[in-house]
Amino acid sequence: MKYFFKSRYLVCIIFILTILHLEGCNYSGDSLGSSPGITFLVSRKTLDVGMDSIFSKNPQYKIPEKWRDLDNWSQRGFGFLKGKIFYFKTSPEEMYYVTMLGDSIDDDIKLKTTIAIRAINTGYRWFKYNELSDEERKRINERFNEEIVPRLEVYTGNHASKETE
């Protein structure tokens, strides 16, 4: 009988500690958030080929060896996202994790694929897009829209449509 009360007491303590722990957790989700979408009226495959063309014709956007270990999205549980990492060498040196958000048929029977920046890394840690200040997001969007999007437009033969924040 003594053992029954001791084990019951222990179960109650564990239950209370579990509740207190869960109350302290932040359940905002594991979403990365994203920049405003940039849509191309092409298939995901065509856009993927366009991104690969950027890397082959502009190798400065490839991840440098010193940051190669930061390409760990699969290990972090985001392997299901179709993403690419774009590296920028100067002012500031950083990388953008960009994903393709769709590949569907719209009313005009045209394929469309949307890309968005999901995370930014400055060499030591990935920051979710929605963790950044408005000023940082603006700077990042401008850099991506000026350097990467025009190249994608050329390589896909399609003009991008940009959402606004």
Image: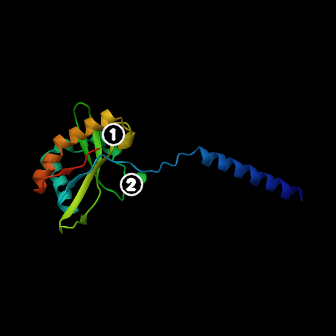
Pick whichever, 140 or 134, lies toward us. 134
Q: Residues within 10 Å of mark 2 (few under 14, many from 20)?
A: some
**Rendered residue at 15%/52% (across/down):** 53
- Asked where in the image residue 133 lies, by quadrant, the reply is top left
Q: Position of residue 116 (x, y in %)?
A: 28, 50
Residue that extends furthest to the right in the rendered view of this protein: 1
The residue type indicated by label 2 comes to Phe
From the viewer's perspective, tell me whether residue 28 is left or right of residue 143.
right
Residue that label 2 marks? 78
Q: Is residue 128 visible?
A: no
Q: Which mark is residue 103?
A: none
- Asked where in the image residue 3 lies, by quadrant, the reply is bottom right
Pick whichever, 67 or 142, lies toward us. 142
Residue that label 1 marks? 121
Q: Position of residue 30 (x, y in %)?
A: 45, 50
Q: How is the image coloured?
A: rainbow
Check disc 1 and report its element: helix, strand or loop. Answer: strand
Q: Position of residue 134 (x, y in %)?
A: 33, 35
User: Disc 2 versus disc 1: distance between alpha carbons?
Assistant: 16 Å
The answer to whether the residues at label 2 and label 1 have Cβ atoms under 8 Å apart is no
Q: Is residue 16 visible?
A: yes
Answer with mark 2 or mark 1, whichever residue precedes in sequence: 2
From the viewer's perspective, tell me whether residue 71 is left or right of residue 40.
right
From the viewer's perspective, tell me whether residue 124 is left or right of residue 17.
left
From the viewer's perspective, tell me whether residue 122 is left or right of residue 147.
right
Quadrant where the C terminus lies?
Answer: top left
| Relative height, residue 132 to residue 19 (above, below) | above
The residue type indicated by label 1 comes to Asn
Residue that extends furthest to the bottom in the rendered view of this protein: 109
**Rendered residue at 11%/54% (across/down):** 155
Q: Position of residue 2 (x, y in %)?
A: 89, 56
Pick whichever, 10 or 116, lies toward us. 116
